[in-house]
Image: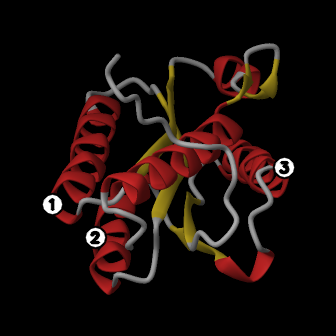
Amino acid sequence: MAKTFEGTLSAKGLRLAVLMSRFNESVSQRLLEGAQEALARTQAIEDHVEVYKVPGAWELPVLAARLAATGRYDALVALGCVIRGGTPHFEFVCAESTRGLSRVALDHGIPVALGVLTCDTLEQALERSGGKHGNKGAEAAVSAVEMATLLRQVRGGKR
């Protein structure tokens, strides 16, 4: 039988950074609260979790790259909310911020969990930030923990 590797849901000993876009802050704050509650459930040490706030989703990748380059973190959690408006700006911000975050993860070998909502309406965003569709911030935080612990196994316990 093949050996199976899987991350755990225990954040004990992990150092995590949560990056939050302040644009659509009422939604982003709900995502942050969900992420913090989820990290508490995974037994993350409060002093090992740092929160950084940026103006908007566009700015998330540059901060993520800088934080990943420090080597201080086992995983990053990117949170934010982009709501479609009447111009193509929505598509550019959504595509480039997610592309940038993906590049950070691949370039630095660190999990960057995506908790950036891309919604057509405020109602959809509220449903996904603690409403009937759960809290995507919490889901992203749990994903970050699971991936960080999996990568730690792959590296043989090393950061």
Q: Name the residue beneath numbered marker 1.
A: 107
**Gap between marks 2 and 3, in whole Å?**
27 Å
What type is the residue that disc 3 sits on? Arg
Image x and y of residue 100, in percent: 23, 52
- Protein image colouring: secondary structure
1 or 2: tag closer to the N-terminus: 2
Image x and y of residue 45, in percent: 77, 73
What type is the residue that disc 2 sits on? Ala
Residue drawn at (84%, 49%) of the image: 41
Q: Name the residue beneath numbered marker 2.
A: 65
Eyeballing the image, is 70 above or below 33?
below
Residue drawn at (57%, 68%) of the image: 16
In the image: residue 74, left or right of residue 134: left
**In front: 57, or 158?**
158
**In front: 104, or 126?**
104
What type is the residue that disc 1 sits on? Asp
Please rate how many residues cluster around mark 1, counting C-alpha atoms within 10 Å: few if below 14, some from 14 to 19, many from 20: few
In the image: residue 119, left or right of residue 46: left
Q: Verify CB contact (< 8 Å) between mark 1 and mark 2.
A: yes
Quadrant for the N terminus in the image: top left
Please rate how many residues cluster around mark 2, counting C-alpha atoms within 10 Å: few if below 14, some from 14 to 19, many from 20: some
Image x and y of residue 78, in percent: 49, 53
Eyeballing the image, is 37 above or below 11?
above
